Image (spheres, grey):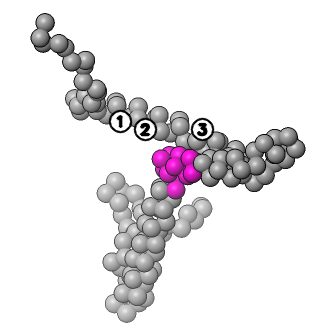
């Protein structure tokens, strides 16, 4: 029989060391490992809380960096700065067929914009579907004003 890291717990005697990660019984009857820090000694519980906080920060950073709007803004900055740099020597570079770092940044920026657009469109579609489900019509520009004087 394979050992998957889960085992039945036996009653602990009052002086025995506690298992650092004891399994618990789930409501559905399955065996699960505890994820809370209530069973740990105070120093270990503090370390566990610190790790959770650190991982929350990393997850927030990951979500921010991978957000399509962030990627689009960074891509636009790349394109603008590379255009500024390349515009100074564009004619000379074109006639001499010379590639510079600014040209590479421009290419990376264009690819970033193209990669961000589908995610932004998908998010807009989900927003519009959600607005329809909740009975809220997305705002639209007002109709042309009619001439009341005629």
Q: Residue at x 54, y 67 (%)?
A: 5
Label 3 close to label 1 by CB (< 8 Å): no
Q: Nearer the viewer, residue 100 or 46?
A: 100
Label 2 close to label 1 by CB (< 8 Å): yes
Image x and y of residue 19, in percent: 44, 80
Residues at marks 2 and 3, CA–CA distance in whole angstroms: 15 Å
For disc 2, the marked residue is 123
The mark that comes first in sequence, 2 or 3, is: 3
Residue at far left of view = 149
Judged from the image, the secondary structure of the residue bearing numbered disc 3 is: helix
Q: Does the rendering let one see residue 64?
A: yes
Image quadrant holding the C terminus, namely: top left
Q: Residue at x 27, y 30 (%)?
A: 139
Quarter assignment of residue 45:
bottom left
Residues at marks 3 and 1, CA–CA distance in whole angstroms: 21 Å
> Which segment did they paint magenta?
65-77
- State whether residue 78 is above or below residue 10: above
For disc 3, the marked residue is 114
For disc 1, the marked residue is 127
Q: Nearer the viewer, residue 81 or 8?
A: 81
């Amino acid at each position: 029989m394979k050992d998957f890291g889960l085992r039945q717990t036996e009653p602990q005697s009052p002086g025995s060391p506690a298992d650092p990660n004891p399994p618990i019984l789930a409501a559905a009857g399955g065996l699960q490992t505890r994820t809370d820090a209530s069973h740990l000694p105070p120093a270990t519980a503090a370390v566990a809380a610190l790790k959770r906080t650190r991982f929350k920060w990393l997850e927030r950073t990951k979500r921010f960096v991978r957000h399509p709007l962030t990627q689009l803004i960074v891509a636009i900055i790349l394109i603008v700065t590379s255009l500024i740099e390349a515009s100074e020597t564009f004619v000379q570079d074109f006639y001499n067929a010379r590639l510079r770092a600014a040209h590479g940044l421009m290419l990376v920026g264009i690819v970033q914009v193209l990669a961000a657009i589908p995610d932004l469109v998908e998010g807009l579609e989900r927003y519009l579907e959600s607005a329809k489900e909740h009975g809220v019509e997305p705002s639209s520009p007002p109709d042309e004003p009619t001439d009341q004087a005629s």
